[in-house]
Amino acid sequence: MNNLIGKNLTAGYGGVDIIKDINLEVNEGEIVVIVGPNGAGKSTAMKALLGMLSLTSGSVEYSNEEISSMLPQNRINLGLAFVPQTNNVFTGMTVEENLEMGGFLRDDDIIHTINDVYDLFPILKEKRNQSAGELSGGQRQQVAFGRALMTQPKILMLDEPTAGVSPIVMDELFSRIIEVRKTGVGILMVEQNAKQALGIADRGYVLVNGKNSREGTGQELLNNPEVRKSFLGG
Amino acid sequence: MMKFERYEWLAISIMFSLFILVGLIQGWSVSLVILNMCIISAIMTMGVNISWGYAGVINFGVMGFLAMGGLAAVIVSYPPITESWKVGGTGIGISFVLLVVLVISVMYINKAVKEKRNRYISNGIVIVFGILVIRFFYLNATANIEDVNPAIAGFLGGLGLPIIFSWIVGGFFAAGVAFIIGKVALGLRSDYLAIVTLGISEIVVSVLKHEEWLSRGVKNVIGLKRPVPYEINLQNTDWFISLITYINTSKLNNIIDVGDRDEALNKLIIEGSSIFVKLSYASLFFIVMFIIFYFANKAQLSPWGRMMRAIRDNEIAASAMGKDVVKQHLIIFVIGAAIVGVAGAMLVTLDGLFTPSAYRPLRFTFIIWIMVIVGGSGNNLGAIFGGFVIWFSWIEAAPLTTFIINQITTGLDSNNPLRLHLLDSVPYFRYLLMGSILLLILRYRPKGIIPERVRHS
Amino acid sequence: MIDFLNSIIVLLNFIIIPGISYGSQLALGALGVTFVYAILRFANFAHGEIMSFGAMITILFTWFFQSQNIGLGILPTALLALPVGIIATIILCIISDKFVFQYYRYQKSVPVVLAMVSIGVMFVINAIIRIIIGTETIKFSDGQKFIMKAKQFKVMTGLNEGLALKSSQVITILITIVLLTFTFWFLQKTKTGKSMRAFSDNEDLALLSGINPDRVVFITWAIVGVLACVAGSLYGLDKNYKPLIYLNLVLPIFASAIVGGIGNPFGAVVGGYIIAFSEIMITYAYKKFFVYLLPGPLEPSGLVQILSTDYKFAVSFSILVIVLLIRPSGLFRGRVL
């Protein structure tokens, strides 16, 4: 079984450590959510797993293989995928070209995967020849999501996939995420909308001030009075 | 007053020993010619450095500002040509007034007409109509002016004042042009601004080259009055002759024959007069350089200089703190250009002639930028050092290359085609030298030879 | 009616045909500049010298082929030498990247530093060219000079005005069409071309998609080499090779790229033609044209010239400034600057 594990991660920007000694794990076929207050280092933790910033200490393992010093591109090759929070589509390219670029590393025929993405997000099929920059926020998120799926990842990381979209679109995106999980993909996401995210999560981590504060199943965290009080609005 | 660090003293002494070396090897006259140009280069470099080094505003319009300074030298010092004013003065005057009216009406339209499309249309109509009217007066007037004794005049002439005033006027001329350019182009991203300023300087130079009524264009203006004595006058001045005699007493006393002695004295006087003139220029230039250096340093240390650095290092933060970044950029761009203008007037003063076609933006702008980068942007002493070193290498590259080629090809026959070809190409090696210096400095010492001092204030 | 035809021929002969061929040369040059800008993200001041270098190699091999009596009959021998020039130019580009630009790319230097670096490269290439070939004007077009001479045309049509068609003009236009078609096909249809667009569009996301930046940069320089060498050689073929003119050519080329929207290949091509036509149209004296078109009493007395030809170079920059004032991102939305 494929899994991604971050052990005792300490990392940050310009010599300042933002996350300290964090442990994270995501397995194939489960949804894991990282929640926490602003500035807790949620996105940083995710970027550390992907190798987009160098670790001060700790290690990253993928399917029992140490990948701490691997370039992000090569981790993509292994089966990781990442959807950034902003600037996550090629605005000057059409929807279909965005998807093709997602499958850039694949040598096999990617048309089936493109069709799978279109099945998942029918609106994209309709807008396949429109440039991604002209789409609405929610549609762009779908393109970004679809682009990441094109690599046929084992583990998919989403950085606030529902930031800035309407509640209806958010529900829709979450239901798509559940559908993707059904295909066996492990999903790690950072979410501001902690309540809804934990609602669909198998497991969750709470980060506070760059440290692991609590972890458990989605339901456990939802029902925990302290967690509720701190960021679920009571 | 600032104190120099040890390596800065080292840089200064290297510069001086170089001139002494050239003086001893190639003669003092050569050394002084190079020195004078070095001082002018240093002033230009300081001008560029103020906008780039202090505030990060790029200025590739150097040649345009330099040429404006040169124009100032002509307009201040050339005697007025009454004939030209008589036939064309009114026409030029009317054109100028009309131009002002045109600009004001365009500004009025920009304010008054709110809708974008209408604004463009009405502006377009006003501008086209205005230009047609202006052309009518203007073309007549300029044709008349250019007909006045074209062999020696054919332009409006100047004010007939001492040329030294033009050093200040040149600064103002350049500042005026810089203000217009800045209004248009500042606010663009820096590499973009570089291209635009370079292009506008090309426009400025081509105007000076082709508007003969103003500057005689490619026909050049020659015989501008000097601020220092002429050699020929010096040679007939008593105090100068006695000075030379006094300096060379021992040498002359060794010559016994009276005729020989007179001849030797005569030779010394001619040589001495040329050196004296160059020294006078050098002292005047040095004073200007020192004044600019003093104030530039003072400004850099002032709160204003600190604010400029803050803007340079983090534009977004500075504008968030309520600094008007575009306005400050405009101010420093204009100041930098003014200093270049001063240098331009000095350059024409030194040459005694104004040749618009010599201002070739693409050839010389970059040399000045190499001076800035090599010297160390943000450091005025570095700017001066860069100006000196680069001009010095530019001039001395040829003799040095000849020497090196001769050394390398000693094994070859003196008529070997490769050797001859290389010797023919000697003037081109200076470009290789300039490019290599720039690349090496950018790679291994990106802050320049004398880097900006980091002040934690 | 005859007068009308004559006036059209005047326009064709003095504006349209020269405009298209000069425009093609600028378009190819501007396309190269825009490629570097889109992928490597700096203004490459060395581009003019790269063009000049390509033309120089083409000339050297033209001479070589001529000395071996290898030719193309009525076509200029330079066409045979062009592929060699292209290969040499690509090598030059790759070398300058490996030894110079790459370092700053890895350092993630700001664009203006890279622009300065390109000035250094410009000086070095400039010196190499001068040392190898000197500074003299070189005429290297051979073969049949005209496809149609003005006189032939007059005899053929019986009109007063002649229409001259130089073979260098036709070759320029044909090669440009082929090269532009190929470039746009490459960018729009091939996987590699698309990956270059993606890289230009969003570098971080391109990396996340597994696009290899070094490969993109390599291909960019290869394309830039082809475009620069062809543009430089065609310009030299059309107007004789002057090593020093390419330095000045940088300005209208930059103007073309920026007017069209820098980083936008289509914009660069359109920009090239806009700049070329404005330079020619604004400085052309229309007297002859109006003499044919208007009845006697209305004929103009002056030259009917908007600006004197002295201002040719200034025109491109005035247009640049106007476009910047009205639409800073260029006509076709380049990168936001």
Image (cartoon, rainbow, N blue to C red):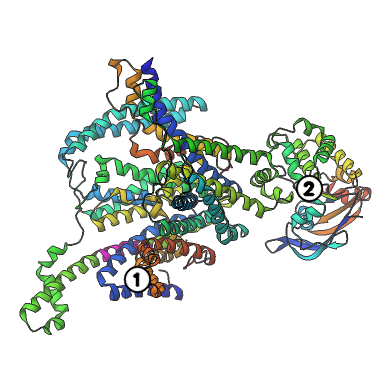
Distance from label 1 to label 2 (Cα)?
Answer: 63 Å
In the picture provided, is C287 more to the left or to the right than A28? left
Which residue position holds label 1?
B414
Q: Is B32 situated above or below A143? A: below
Front one among C192 and C60: C60
Q: Is B383 situated above or below B334? A: below
Label 2 crowd (10 A; few <14 / some 14-19 / many >=20): few
Name which residue lies at 37% across and 29% down: C150
Q: Quadrant of the C terminus of chain A?
A: top right
Which residue position holds label 2?
A107
Front one among C266 and B122: C266
Q: Amino acid at mark 1?
A: Ser
The segment highlighted magenta reads B281-294
Q: Give the percent coordinates (x, y) of residue B14.
A: 39, 74
Q: Amino acid at mark 2?
A: Asp
| Element at label 2 | loop
Name which residue lies at 17% across and 78% down: B247
| Element at label 1 | loop
Q: Give the percent coordinates (x, y) of residue C14.
A: 39, 30
In the picture provided, is B327 more to the left or to the right than B207? right
